[in-house]
């Protein structure tokens, strides 16, 4: 059948759903939140915002090298989705990874030190901004290759299924990654093998230097591509914490109880450029558009308003949370500044797991066979 010719994809997907926050608040998954848990969620969002602000300042001071992809404006997505995870649930994401790291419980100190390239960083100063990791928290990074984390997240879900665990993997990507071939290969396997993976598209409307509307073909939204692989999908208003939790909860339940994958498209917005090197981010979008999001759709402002209405927060307590977050972010920069750089002797560590654990088990040493191991500690493949 000849496909109906469509106007070249310059249309904009319907980015914002008309959601009723009060109705969302009545849902069981949101009703079960205690006042303390709500304050914790709000605090986590504010901590991310202040951490990102301090990171930008440190970058401008020349303390941070390489790239810096900031998460300001997208806080409800990381906090809302991760707030629902259990012991056998996992997280993997792309290079805009600071928000997810703090949401899983990583400290500002280890994250800031990582960006400073210091030995006290979460990746011992070898990863930088794009490579935060915390295996003890089921947080598997932090990946720089666009879409490269999606097959890895699918593999984590495959392992969970093979091990018979009631868990899932949240695999985050930006809207620019959706066109990568590896993403579609992962979609195919997830749909074919019924894997408990939740693909989360954080659609902030802009890839690196251009808009989603200019770069991606889609019927109604990007998540709808899931239909081609037999997967369920949904869209989320990423500025409404309750909506993020409600839609993610349904996807997690599907993964846990039916071992079925889901694609969620979270409509959100980034206030900064693609990275701090994106000097044109006010040229491919208007300043008025950015201002409109900050004044009318900001996830922290909307959450604060909702929680004050519920009696969970007051204006004063919200100010105290903000002040504490700023002080914590400042202290993390001071911690990073004072921390040592990695010693030269560590340069070959953390490359081969088997080398870091040599001598502990004959089977581990067997893995090292086929490598030249020199007195200087260097490891070279034959």
Image: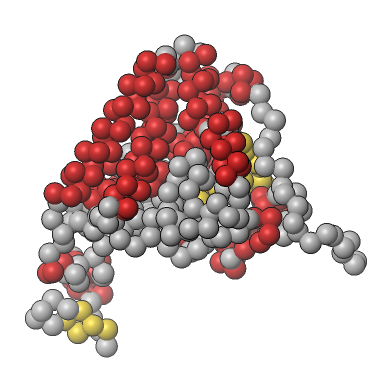
Above or below for 102 versus 143: above
Above or below for 221 versus 216: above
In this orientation, which residue lies closer to the viewer: 66 or 93? 66
- Residue 58 appears at what percent x and percent y? 29, 49
The reply to whether residue 84 is visible in this rendering is no
Question: What residue do we see at 23% from left, 42% from top?
Answer: 332
Q: Residue furthest left?
A: 375
Q: Residue furthest bottom?
A: 382
The reply to whether residue 242 is visible in this rendering is yes
Q: Quadrant of the N terminus?
A: bottom right
Question: What residue do we see at 61% from left, 23% from top?
Answer: 21
Question: What residue do we see at 28% from left, 38% from top?
Answer: 329
Above or below for 331 versus 261: above
Visual colour scheme: secondary structure
Number of callouts: 0
- Residue 299 appears at what percent x and percent y? 52, 32
Judge from the rendering whether residue 329 lies leftward or rightward of residue 258; answer left or right: left
In this orientation, which residue lies closer to the viewer: 317 or 156? 317
Judge from the rendering whether residue 318 lies leftward or rightward of residue 180; answer left or right: left
Above or below for 267 versus 298: below
In this orientation, which residue lies closer to the viewer: 352 or 294? 294
- Residue 53 appears at what percent x and percent y? 36, 42
- Residue 47 appears at what percent x and percent y? 36, 35
Q: Quadrant of the C terminus?
A: bottom left
Question: What residue do we see at 59% from left, 30% from top?
Answer: 296
Determine the image quadrant of residue 345.
bottom left
């Amino acid at each position: 059948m000849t496909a109906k010719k469509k106007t070249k994809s310059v249309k904009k997907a319907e980015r914002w759903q008309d959601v009723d926050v009060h109705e969302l608040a009545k849902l069981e998954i949101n009703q079960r939140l205690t006042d303390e848990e709500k304050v914790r969620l709000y605090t986590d969002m504010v901590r991310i915002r202040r951490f990102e602000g301090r990171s930008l300042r440190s970058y401008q001071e020349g303390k941070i090298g390489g790239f810096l992809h900031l998460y300001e404006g997208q806080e409800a997505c990381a906090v809302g989705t991760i707030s629902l995870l259990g012991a056998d649930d996992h997280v993997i994401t792309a290079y805009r990874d600071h928000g997810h790291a703090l949401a899983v419980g990583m400290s500002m100190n280890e994250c800031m030190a990582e960006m400073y390239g210091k030995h006290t960083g979460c990746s011992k100063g070898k990863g930088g901004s794009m490579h935060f990791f915390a295996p003890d928290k089921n947080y598997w990074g932090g990946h720089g290759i666009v879409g490269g984390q999606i097959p890895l997240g699918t593999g984590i879900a495959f392992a969970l299924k093979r091990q018979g665990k009631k868990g899932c993997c949240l695999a985050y990507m930006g809207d620019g990654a959706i066109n990568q071939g590896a993403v579609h290969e992962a979609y195919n396997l997830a749909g074919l093998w019924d894997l408990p993976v939740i693909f989360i598209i954080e659609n902030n409307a802009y890839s690196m230097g251009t808009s989603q509307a200019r770069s991606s073909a889609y019927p109604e939204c990007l998540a709808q591509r899931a239909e081609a692989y037999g997967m369920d999908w949904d869209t989320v208003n990423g500025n409404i914490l309750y909506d993020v939790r409600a839609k993610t909860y349904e996807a997690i339940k599907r993964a846990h109880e039916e071992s079925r994958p889901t694609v969620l498209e979270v409509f959100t917005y980034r206030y900064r450029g693609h990275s701090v090197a994106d000097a044109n981010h006010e040229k491919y979008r208007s300043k008025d558009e950015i201002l409109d999001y900050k004044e009318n759709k900001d996830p922290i402002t909307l959450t604060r308003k909702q929680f004050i209405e519920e009696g969970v927060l007051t204006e004063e307590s919200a100010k105290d949370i903000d002040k504490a977050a700023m002080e914590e972010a400042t202290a993390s920069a001071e911690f990073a500044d004072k921390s040592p750089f990695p010693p030269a002797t560590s340069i070959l560590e953390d490359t081969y797991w088997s080398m870091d654990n040599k001598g502990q088990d004959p089977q581990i040493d067997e893995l090292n066979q086929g490598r030249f191991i020199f007195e200087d500690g260097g490891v070279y493949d034959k």
